[in-house]
Image (cartoon, grey):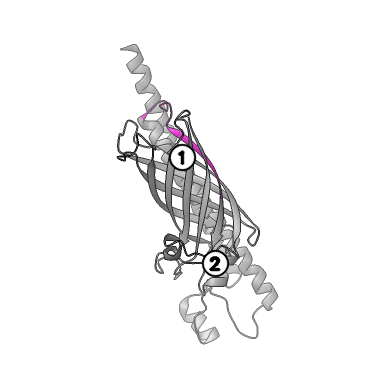
């Protein structure tokens, strides 16, 4: 009886902490958004649609007032850049809040993590402006590509699963070469772990979907598309090959896709694709 009471008290404490964290995060995000809206209104960026139409003759995509008395283009460009950074920061805070709440929620269900529930992945990739279809057909052009290094932390959400395993993952990506920005991705993944040839080559296949937040609009995406955005949908495909003599280590090959989901994200259609290879450690 004693250990059961201790375990129950631990779970109640963890759930209480999760509730307090959720309330704090909600208040913080609300304050950030209210401050952002106040700043945009102060700079003339959030006039109602009627006033914008009257001032410009047409609605402006970013709410900027285009008339002779408006600030200079340089001032407007700087203001818009600040607005982009503010939106990216808000998106990043939202992503961090979601990941934190996911972690705390599963802490509520289990006072301690089971062994081998966590995965740390380091991989290197190259980006192409060609379509996902070109990538799938192995015809994508990487001659004018940019490279990146990514680190990803994930956790198993379905301990004991034999065939289909659910996970969450958070990524930090550093682009370099033709592009020079940071990227933050959060996603939910489904991993299929049983194949007929596993006795010869142990194989796992994973598909994941979530949100991708870049600190600026990627150059490859803006060069190849009229409509672009720093915040887009993120899609992942992965093949994993655990090492026979070291089962806690795996080789992974990944397809890394950002897109607007046929215009769902700010009217963006298509964006960028990447392929990468790396190592994963399970602990």
Which disc number belongs to residue 154? 1
- Name the foreground residue: 192 vs 264: 192
Return the residue nearer the eye: 194 or 237. Answer: 194
| SS at mark 2 in the image | helix
Q: Residue 6, relative to residue 251: is it above or below?
A: above
Does the stretch in magenta take in 115? yes
Is residue 224 shown left or right of residue 204?
right
Q: Position of residue 135 (x, y in %)?
A: 46, 61
Residue at the disc numbered 2:
221
Q: Dot 1: within a 10 Å radius of its alpha carbon, few (fewer than 14), some, or many (20 or more) residues?
A: many
Q: Secondary structure at mark 1?
A: strand
Q: Position of residue 238 (x, y in %)?
A: 43, 48
Q: Is residue 86 above or below residue 266?
A: above
Numbered range of the magenta stretch: 110-124
Residue 185 position (above or below residue 70): above
Measured Cα–Cα span from mark 2 to mark 1: 27 Å
Residue 224 figure quarter? bottom right
């Amino acid at each position: 009886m004693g250990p059961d009471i201790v375990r129950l008290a631990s779970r109640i404490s963890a759930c209480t902490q999760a509730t307090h964290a959720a309330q704090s995060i909600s208040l913080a995000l609300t304050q950030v958004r209210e401050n952002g809206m106040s700043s945009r209104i102060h700079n003339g960026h959030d006039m109602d649609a009627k006033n914008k139409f009257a001032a410009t003759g047409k609605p402006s995509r970013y709410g900027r007032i285009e008339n002779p008395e408006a600030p200079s283009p340089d001032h407007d460009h700087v203001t818009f850049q600040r607005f982009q950074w503010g939106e990216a920061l808000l998106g990043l805070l939202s992503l961090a809040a979601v990941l934190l709440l996911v972690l705390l929620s599963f802490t509520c269900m289990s006072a301690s993590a089971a062994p081998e529930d966590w995965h740390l992945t380091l991989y290197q990739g190259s980006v192409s402006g060609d379509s996902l279809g070109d990538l799938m057909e192995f015809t994508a052009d990487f001659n004018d590509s940019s490279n990146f290094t990514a680190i990803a932390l994930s956790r198993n959400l379905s301990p004991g699963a034999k065939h289909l395993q659910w996970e969450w993952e958070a990524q930090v990506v550093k682009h370099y070469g033709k592009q020079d920005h940071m990227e933050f991705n959060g996603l939910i993944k489904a991993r299929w772990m049983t194949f007929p040839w596993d006795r010869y080559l142990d194989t796992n296949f994973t598909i994941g979907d979530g949100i991708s937040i870049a600190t600026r609009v990627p150059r490859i995406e803006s060069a190849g598309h009229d409509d672009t955005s720093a915040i887009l949908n993120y899609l992942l495909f992965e093949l994993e090959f655990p090492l026979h003599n070291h089962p806690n280590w795996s080789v992974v090959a990944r397809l890394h896709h950002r897109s607007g989901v046929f215009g769902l994200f700010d009217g963006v259609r298509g964006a960028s694709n990447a392929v990468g290879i790396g190592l994963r450690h399970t602990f």
